[in-house]
Amino acid sequence: MVRFLRPLLRGTTYTRLLHLWVPVLLVSVWLFVDMARPWLPALLLVPVGLVPAVRRGEGLQARFMLTPDETDSGISTAPSATWGDRLRTVLWLEIRMVLGAVTVALSVWMPVLAVDLAAASLGRTPYDNPLLPIDEPHWGYAALVPLPLLALAAAVVGLGELVTAVARWLLGPSAAERLAALEERTERLLERTRIARELHDSIGHALTVAVVQAGAARAAGDPAFTDRALGAIEETGRAALEDLDRVLGILREAERPVSGRPTLVEADRLLESARASGTKVDAEFCGPLGQVPGPVSREGYRILQEALTNVLRHGDGVPARVRVAVADGRLDLEVRNPLPAAAPGPGRGSGLRGIRERAALLGGRAHTGPRDGDWQVHVELPLG
């Protein structure tokens, strides 16, 4: 019994009931105008449903009154974009009208029936009730009084569930809307992946520089070198904090532009950071770096950062050669260093994997691994 009564204690049951009543209330107003043609409002719903904005209004009503507690109701609030959307809206309006008429009829006649049964049990003959032709009142009718009320309660709950299911079917997202939602979710996932790579590259580079600098300063035992090392650690830490603030800002503001991310024009700070860690870096830049498209230049900066971090982390102080060239419609970036005594195998770490992923996303290609006695990171990115 408690399980049966539980739906009657939910507010959603009564907002759905109100949603079913609304169209019939409009029809009742029309009956005061022309009672001879009660079907005319249902006919007028056809051109009304073809208006694109009507689908949006019906979707908002359905979300607010049929599924008020659901974050993902499966009901669209976009206007009609195709004829399929318009025809589904017309069908929804007609079905809503029919279900509303059934609901209002039950809401009126079931209580009336219960009252007439109670009157018949008290010895009074019901007057003009087509559902209850009673000629001889009897006290036994008292046992039937709860039945119309229970039927009304079941109808209210059942019709509410039915109209909600119909709303999800006819006002649900179209194929184009589902595709757009899927693309949006994909973009969010790609953005989260990119932010994770940003944090790995920036913070990983800063920590590597700090560890190398601290170790070199302790081993050198030279106050002047220690001062330079501390200065380099401070500068690298500040740059990492700036990157961290920017990435957190992107997380807080989904629409924030990415124009603030560093580009290859600012590559000098990466080279200086590596040199301050005691690594000799020979760099060669060819071509107009300032004319490289923003996405390519930003990803190129992160690739160079990760490659230099790899040198500092695994190179044991070996020198590195950096070459960045812009020519023939592509960006060519290469970082080489002699293989250390314990040469690693082909790169499978998250940083080197991130380099290959960045290159692939931009339609380029990347090689990370031993070549000609050196460890090489070589990336080619198209500019267009």
Image: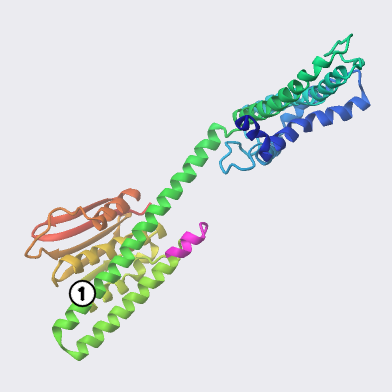
Q: Residue 323: x percent and y percent?
A: 23, 65
Please name the residue shown 61% across and 28% down the image: 165
Q: Quadrant of residue 274?
A: bottom left
Which residue has dot 1 on it?
212
Q: Residue drawn at (41%, 65%), measured in percent from left and top?
A: 261
In the image, 93: left or right of 177? right
- Whether residue 257 can be seen here: no
Q: Residue furthest bottom?
A: 223
Question: Which color scheme does this rendered protein use?
Answer: rainbow
Query: Which span is picked out in magenta?
Result: 247-257
The residue most toward the left is 341
- Look at the picture and state if 191 lies above or below 169: below
Does the magenta segment cover residue 256?
yes
| The N terminus - image quarter | top right
Q: Is residue 15 left or right of residue 43?
A: left
Q: Residue type at mark 1?
A: Val
Residue 163 against residue 138 in the figure, above or below: below
Neighbour tally class for label 1: few under 14, some 14-19, many 20 plus, Cα within 10 Å: many
Q: Please, which residue is most extreme toward the top here?
A: 135
Q: Determine whether 21 is above or below 272 in the image.
A: above
Q: Position of residue 32 (x, y in %)?
A: 93, 27
Q: Quick one: 365 or 254, which is closer to the camera?
A: 254
Q: Is residue 166 magenta?
A: no
